[in-house]
Amino acid sequence: MKFKVSKLLLIVLLGIILFVPIAYFRADSGWDADYGGGGSYGGGSYDGGSYSGGNWGYSGGSISFGDSSTASISAIVTIIIVAIIIVAVVKNSKGKTGTNNRTTSSTSATYMSQEDINAIDPTINIERTLDECFEIYRKVQYAWSQFNYEELSELLSDELYNNYKMQLETLKMKKQKNLMEDITFVTGGIKSVANNGDNQEVVVGLTVRMKDYVINETTNKVVRGSDQYTLEITYDITLIRTKGKALNNCPNCGAPLSDNAREKCEYCDAVIVKGNQKFVMSKKQNIHQRRV
């Protein structure tokens, strides 16, 4: 019976591969949320292919296997791989009776306890750090949506900021805007805490819910994703900061400094390198997402 079911599964998978167009869409700041789960995509397209400088990729729309020899070869290779996997599963399941071999995927993570964190840095409180991480995430999403480079520069590491800025410039050239609405916190925890000299890195597992879609700025029509459903996304977010004594006055003229991480002295125009006394986001990785 299992073998018959597996053969039926193989036929279905091959049908999907052969006849259903494949598209890969990403959104969310940094383009790490996936629109592949369905929805209304409209007629827009990113014709530039993958973006080499950032952490996103876009295939340029759906792929028709009949359009080129390269696509046909890719289809054949995919079919062979799927067939091999299914045959291996069938063979592995033969001879096993009376047991339930079904596995369930899980996005749950092992988080650090407050006691474990105290052994590394007793100043880090789980609840307070989660609140801070979510607030940074929320502000980054809205700043991304509004092309607010100044706020992004205060919330992100230099490397991530430059990455996001280039991606936003691509969006502006396409006259499109990525909107994220109704962002709410679901759950989270601290995965790791590491001290490296004056620098500290904290990895936070964060699950949020939000609406996430792209519009054409001229027509306000949705061209990616949908404004009709909500996504639940789980991230690994890396926060970094510079520990040590805060720099409160300009080392050149002695004038008081604001809380911004990067700035010029308002009085003498000297460039100030203060370091990040507060946490900023240095990495954001999509671990899992689903439509809710």
Image: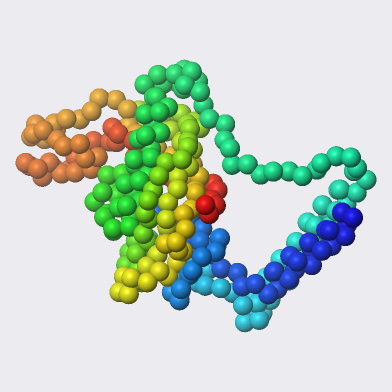
Q: Is residue 126 above or below residue 25?
A: above
- Residue at x 39% of width, y 24% of height: 124
From the top left corner, tell me how far across and down residue 156 is, in percent: 33, 45
Determine which quarter of the picture holds residue 195.
top left
Q: Is residue 194 left or right of residue 15?
A: left
Tell me if I can see residue 49 in this picture.
no
**For this rendering, which residue is in front, 99 or 119?**
99
**For this rendering, which residue is in front, 277 or 225?**
225
Tell me if I can see residue 188 in this picture.
yes
Q: Is residue 114 above or below residue 285?
A: above
Determine which quarter of the picture holds residue 5.
bottom right
From the top left corner, tell me how far across and down residue 144 is, in percent: 33, 55
- Residue at x 32% of width, y 46% of height: 139
From the top left corner, tell me how far across and down residue 60 is, in percent: 50, 72
From the top left corner, tell me how far across and down residue 182 is, in percent: 37, 51
- Residue at x 26% of width, y 49% of height: 151
Determine which quarter of the picture holds residue 3.
bottom right
In the image as oriented, which residue stretches furthest toward the right? 95
Q: Is residue 273 left or right of residue 76?
A: left
- Residue at x 15% of width, y 44% of height: 264
